[in-house]
Amino acid sequence: MRMPKEIATYCPKCKSHQTHTVSLYKAGKRRALAKGERHHKREKSGYGGQKYSLQKKFSKTTKKQTLKLKCKICGYTIQKKGMRLKKLTIE
């Protein structure tokens, strides 16, 4: 699916329709010192192997892509609900 670089949509902060720049949402880097991350690392270490089973067979062929829309006037960012796509190009 092709998506334009800029779209006009509603901005909740400006309370009107403004032009927004479109980008793809990307998950941030995981925190190594977070409680769950430390717990999982401890469970994995030593004998016994992986705590949770690793996913080997996936039922879905695509992942949901989430769009990030940033208002050009106030800089407020909203996320558009993800949709299943094989390929997304922002032009």
Image (spheres, grey):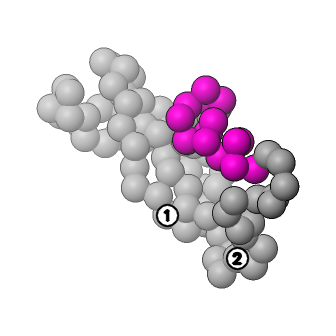
Q: Is residue 33 visible?
A: yes
| Residue occupying the far front of the picture | 47
**Residue at disc 2, secondary structure:** loop
Q: Which residue is mark 2?
A: 58
Query: Disc 2 marks which amino acid?
Result: Phe
Residue 86: say if magenta: no
Q: Which residues are magenta?
A: 31-44
Specify whether 24 is left or right of 21. right
Q: Residue at x 64, y 55 (%)?
A: 88
Whole-Å distance between the Cαs marked 2 and 1?
A: 18 Å
Specify whether 48 is left or right of 19. right
Quadrant of the image occupied by residue 7: top left
Spot occupied by residue 32 in the image (x, y as percentages of width and height): 65, 29
**Residue at disc 1, secondary structure:** strand
Magenta region, mostly helix, strand or loop? helix
Spot occupied by residue 70 in the image (x, y as percentages of width and height): 41, 30
Specify whether 75 is left or right of 90. left
Residue 38: say if magenta: yes
Q: Residue at x 61, y 42 (%)?
A: 39
**Mark 2, other Cα within 10 Å: few <14 / some 14–19 / many ≥20:** few
Residue 75 is marked as: none
First along the sequence among labels 2 and 1: 2
Spot occupied by residue 81 in the image (x, y as percentages of width and height): 40, 55
Is label 2 or label 1 in front?
2
Q: Is residue 86 visible?
A: no
| Residue occupying the far right of the picture | 47
Query: Disc 1 marks which amino acid?
Result: Met
Relative to the observer, which residue lies in front, 4 or 15?
Answer: 15
Q: Which residue is mark 1?
A: 83
Relative to the observer, which residue lies in front, 8 or 83?
Answer: 83
Q: Residue at x 76, y 59 (%)?
A: 50
Q: Residue at x 84, y 55 (%)?
A: 47
